[in-house]
Image (cartoon, helix red, strand yellow):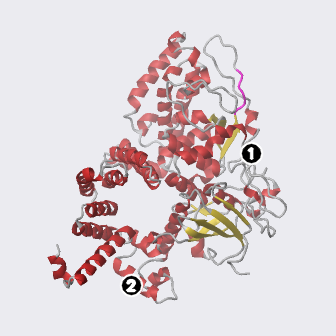
Amino acid sequence: MSDAARQPDAQGDFTRYPVPRLLYYLYKKAFVGELRLESAELGITRIYFREGLACRCDNQAPGEDVLGHVLLERGFIDHQAFHTSLEELAKGGRLQGQILLEMHAISQKQLVDALRLQLRRKLNRLFRLTEARFGLYGGEHPHGSDEEGSRVRADPLWTIYHGVRNNYDVNRLSAELARLDQHTVQLRPEFDKVRPRYGLAQEDLGLIMTLMRGALPIERVFAISNLGPVQTQMLIYTLWVTEVLVATPVQQQQVAAPTGPRQVRRAPSTAHAQAIEDASGGYAAAGSGGYAAAGSGAYAAAGSGGYPAAESPDGAIVDAPPPRSEVAEANSAPIRRRPSGVNDIAGLRRAPSGAHQAAPIRRAPSGSHETGTPSGGLKRRPSSVSELVLGAEDMPADSVQLSDAAKEMRKQILEVFNSIKDQTHFEVLDVSREANNDVIRDAYFALAKVYHPDRIAGMGLADISEQVEEIFRRINEAHTVLTDAEKRKEYEEFLEHGDSEEAGRAALEAEFAFQKGTVFFRKKQFKPALAEFKEAVKLNPKEGEHLAWVAWTIYCDPKTNRERMLPKIKQQLLEAINISPRSAASHYFLGEIYLAMEDSNRALTCFNRALDIQPNHIDAQRHVRIIRMRREKEGKGDGKGGLFGRFLKR
């Protein structure tokens, strides 16, 4: 049977099986075969897997992912080598990478690095898609089996984390995470073994530490997170869908009749073992001969060998955690071809989500109260975490009789809060610059016991919960950075060069705001896109491209009076280029503005400058080609061709 005529072993669509869930499912099953996608945006895409890891992606996407362009962008080759390799490639018979190796233009390591980056970019595109059909074709293929291919394979944990971070917006995240409403969440102990494989951003580590300490209500996680709401959603969703985050329904809690501040009686620890929900949606088991289901939230074995080893972002091999002993035998079954005519992906069928699905996760604004009753039947009253835990809405702070110890603690907390903002990580933990990890951990645990939010709330100090949570966040952050050798080295270099930690954090937040802005822009949601780009400029005014995107978004918004705004937009783009002269996007945007102002000469100059910086800029290439063709046509039409003819027409 030909490849085109073969029926898929299973099929589905992204509406029911989003990309993160699908990639992780194939990883757990150690899938060997082809995932074939069909979408309006990317056309036909073929992704080949070996041992559950993507090793090749062929699609009809624009040319910026061509290997030669990636090598050129990374600085591994120059323009001369690039064009020479294209000439040889046109003769047929060899791949561009092989040609460049034979030319001694690149090393084997550089080729592998470029192939890995090329694959990651192609996979990242898939996370943009919300509508696509897919089919699974199990079986052997020629890709990814040699040494070079094994080094190119994409780690699904890294792919999912960065794919969600770069492409998901608040609407998609809220829809996916709605089932976690009224759940507690915590990280599995095994997470620490696989953490390097995600390539987490430094700012994520504070929330990671919080989730590792024990189960917390999801609303409390959002309240004490050091990240923004959307970034918190992204991290929670990634951890949940890759099954390192345990979600347990909150059982109705009983409240003892208090004589002092009310305290919620905690559920017994055995509640953790009850009704743990699978991050992949509680997949139901497939029928006989079908795809094996995912486990009940535990790590599923990939064949008899458990998880295959995978590469970390820096190329090192990281051992994946072994399968958990409680995984049912059926969960370790490899993917098998389904009987002919049975093409639904039963192994990915989600169990009903229950009453929790209706209510999205959200953090109520400070000072507001939600009085409606969500579908779970539990009335939502408090507007802050302190009220949720202590019932402080009935006990105003000035009516509580505080003990002398509580009064002293309040004074201490406010003093620490006012000073901690300007302290280094070493000063936060009160350790010397020479302190080793043991000293740092001891200092961390000592401070965590004193400033843990639950302890302070239990003293009747709910009214200063925000200050306590900020102190606790800084303690976590200091511990996370100083106990990681690489991050500590980077931080010490910051201090030595006089760069403040705040400046580094602002630059990271600016980049994140910029990425969110591009997501909104692609969806033609210009108002939120403009807000994110302006936030990026505010956080990092030294990055000119952020300012260029502000100007370009204003221009592209159909509500803009372009005729009136063109001079201001042009001036803003000139300012952006002055800040960052090597931004291809800024030069391209300015070229578009000059075209709108009917100045094709300056437009052509801008497009050529964009191509000098980024030779594979497709839109700039198209405009240069159109302008030149138009000029040649005009020259032939009046007999004034060539340079002299074009000069006379100016």
Tell me, yes or no, if residue 104 can be seen here: yes
In terms of secondary structure, what is the magenta stretch mainly? loop
- Amino acid of disc 2: Thr
- Residue for badge 2: 84
Question: x and y percent of residue 227 in the render?
Answer: 49, 41
Instruction: Give the magenta part as a residue range.
Output: 250-254
* Quarter occupied by residue 251: top right
Nearest to viewer (mark 2 / mark 1): 1
- Disc 1 crowd rating (10 Å Cα; few below 14, some 14-19, many 20+) is few
Residue 253 in magenta? Answer: yes
Q: Are marks 2 and 1 in contact (CB under 8 Å)?
A: no
Left or right: where does residue 38 sit relative to residue 254?
left
Question: x and y percent of residue 338 in the render?
Answer: 79, 67
Question: x and y percent of residue 344 in the render?
Answer: 75, 61
Secondary structure category for the residue under label 2: helix
Left or right: where does residue 425 sit relative to residue 316?
left
